[in-house]
Amino acid sequence: MKKANSQQTKVHNRLLILKTIYENATISRAGIARVTGLTRATVSDATADLIRDGLVAEVGIGSSAGGKPPILLSLVNDARYLIGIDLAESEFRGAVIDLRGRIIHRLNLGVDGRDGDTALGLVYELVDQLIPLAEGPVLGIGIGTPGLINARQRIVRNAVNLDWHNLPLGDLLDERYRIPVHIANDSQAAALAEFTFGNSKDNSNLIVINIGRGTGSGIVLNRQLYYGDSFGAGEFGHVTIVENGEICRCGHRGCLETVTSSQAIVRGARAIAGNDRNSLLNRFVSSPDDIDIDVVSLAFEAGDEAVLSLIAGVGRYLGFAAANLVGILNVNRIVLAGRVARFGPALVEPIKREILRRSLPGLADEMAVEISTLGPDIVILGAAALLLDRELGLP
Ligand SMILES: [Zn+2]
């Protein structure tokens, strides 16, 4: 029993020391002892271990505070590679990523209507091609996927677009590749990316609203991704926001997703173009059916009034839903991500306004609503951050 405890302490100290090195560009052993409160001997032993494993290296000599100048340690950014995968859009996106979230290689494969087993085959194809691209040991595979996930059992409980129901994705990948595999919902992965690699590193609490083919959110509370009791925390895309509204792919009517997702925006734009032949939208396509989210962006940038008002409406609906989240959680930072975040201030302003109008006066005075700087890679990076967190206890 005593032995198990000392082993646990050793593992804990090693994680704490690695984390301290990760958080600093360079740091001396004495510096680590000061920050962590561990003894010099413990720090020495653990850093020797980390150097042997290749995760840490001695990189130079620091300035002396009187005595012998200290040796500086640093993380070896490419000591391990992370495979990050995003299954949320119309192409499966994957990348080989270093320990600092730098994308070294990337690969996208078009889904082209594949679902069920053929979609699973495409995941294998993506991983098969990515692993050989890593120029060193691979720490594992992280996956951000749409739908309801059991992150502990690594099962996709339900992903409607991919026609996956109770798919044991984690076990399947485990058997095939024999390396650690972790899975999260795509919006939860996005929140983890923003917290780990984005501009929200210093925020203990954070909500990322992720709007692409679906609408969802991920919630970081007290510096931890919050999963909820059945791993569905943040799934506010299927909260009813329009009574008797349009039917949603989940089977209910008037979900937030039916009025805010990229598909909802495209539907709205097609209706605008169909009703008004002079709409700017029609300049970019020969038929309203050809309008996609990129065409909507072009008309938006050209200042089409009807499109501007369509996007403002999306922002308003997101603001209604965000106000509820803010009212319940009192989180002061919201970050928008996903393909729809490209509309920037046209979404941020109505969201802020609705939060202020619909929550307790004073509660949201310090509210910041921003667009993520991680762009279209956010879910891939989140999948990698999931691996870092689970396998190395970072950040
Ligand atoms: Zn729904």
Image (cartoon, rainbow, N blue to C red):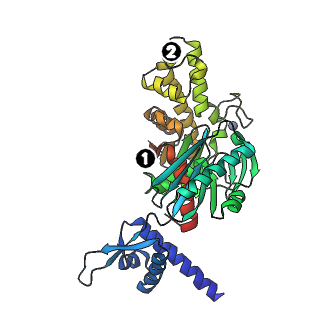
Decide which of 85, 127 is in the foreground and name it: 127
Q: 155 or 308, which lies in front?
A: 155
The residue carrying pointer 2 sits among few (fewer than 14), some (14 to 19) or many (20 or more) residues within 10 Å by Cα, namely some
Q: In this view, does 73 lie above or below 100?
A: below
Q: Position of residue 46 (x, y in %)?
A: 47, 80
Marks 2 and 1: which is nearer the front?
A: 2
| Residue at 59% across, 15% down | 274
Q: Can residue 190 be seen? A: no
What is the distance, in whole Å, between disc 2 and disc 1 at their CAs?
A: 39 Å
* Residue at figure coordinates x 47%, y 35% from the top left: 342
Element assignment for label 1: loop
Q: Is residue 275 visible?
A: yes
Kindly identify which numbered label has been placed on residue 279: 2
Q: Considering only vertical position in the picture, is 182 above or below 321? A: below
Pointer 1 local density, CA inside 10 Å: few below 14, some 14–19, many at least 20 = few
Q: Is residue 137 left or right of residue 120?
A: left
The residue under label 1 is 366
Residue 53 in percent (x, y) is at: 50, 75
Percent position of residue 78, x then y = 46, 63
Q: Give the numbered dot on residue 332.
A: none
Which residue occupies the extreme top position in the image?
277
Q: Is residue 156 above or below residue 21?
A: above
Q: Where in the figure is residue 183, as x and y percent of width and height?
A: 64, 55
State the residue at coordinates (58%, 27%): 266
Ligand 1: image quarter: top right
Mark 2 or mark 1: whose residue is earlier in sequence? 2
Identity, as a three-letter code, of the amino acid under mark 2: Ser
Question: SS class of the residue under badge 2?
Answer: loop
Q: Quadrant of the N terminus?
A: bottom right
Tag 1: residue type?
Answer: Glu
Q: Quadrant of residue 216?
A: top right
